[in-house]
Amino acid sequence: GDSVTQMEGPVTLSEEAFLTINCTYTATGYPSLFWYVQYPGEGLQLLLKATKADDKGSNKGFEATYRKETTSFHLEKGSVQVSDSAVYFCAPIKGAGSYQLTFGKGTKLSVIP
Amino acid sequence: EAGVAQSPRYKIIEKRQSVAFWCNPISGHATLYWYQQILGQGPKLLIQFQNNGVVDDSQLPKDRFSAERLKGVDSTLKIQPAKLEDSAVYLCASSSMAGGYQETQYFGPGTRLLVL
């Protein structure tokens, strides 16, 4: 069946370090890919999205490129801040029918000063 | 614009009891979703409504879970009777238009349920 594989956490980085969180999916026909973020004590919120192959989503210094050939949507940020500490979820959407988001298990990021 | 509202925020019940959660989506959003998020996992869709009709309830345990969205606005999710494995955060989300594949889903703060 359809599935999403995210990099196992937790991830601990020093401030200003480079961040990569890997995400790959196995499915046919995922028309859109999303990254959601959950800050401590807050609800899930959209971080960025890409709706077709080779699209790059970006927000708050984070970027991810929709790579159809490798079925990946890796999240990157060049210089993380303490305020980026959160849980990050990769979520392709199925399309054709219910448009159901299929969430990965989440990757917890802790950024230390 | 007001976000997705959920209540209660926390609920503790004993197994075999019943419980209900309420969700008020963003005004004008046609599509409403209920997700279950077990600790350490990503959210899993339970049911999706388009206005007041069910689009997808394939992962809803229908022997104990039920949901309704009267008048296409507010929604309630009920569990009866609850089991220990139902302990989770129940998230409500909404999206505008037809909930298409480009639409962003906006999430509420969730209801944290503990079944003892």
Image: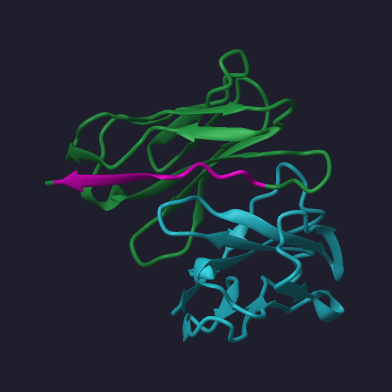
Q: Is residue A79 visible?
A: yes
Quadrant of the frame with the N terminus of chain A: top right
Q: Total number of numbered labels? A: 0
Q: Nearer the viewer, residue B74 or A46?
A: B74
Q: Residue furthest top?
A: A69
Compared to residue B96, the image places residue B86 above or below, namely below
Question: Does residue B12 appear left or right of residue B6 in this picture?
Answer: left
Q: Residue furthest left?
A: A113
Q: Colour of chain B?
A: cyan
Residue B1 location, quadrant? bottom right
Find residue A78 and report its horizontal and vertical position in percent.
Answer: 30, 29
Q: Which residues are magenta?
A: A101-112
Q: Is residue A102 magenta?
A: yes
Q: Nearer the viewer, residue B12 or A51?
A: B12
Find residue B41 and report its horizontal and vertical position in percent.
Answer: 46, 51
Find residue A92 and report its horizontal and vertical position in percent.
Answer: 62, 37
Q: Colour of chain A?
A: green
Question: Does residue B78 appear left or right of residue A89 in this picture?
Answer: right
Q: Residue at x 57, y 78 (%)?
A: B6
Compared to residue B78, the image places residue A13 above or below, namely above
Q: Residue at x 83, y 74 (%)?
A: B72
Find residue B20 and report its horizontal and vertical position in percent.
Answer: 63, 83
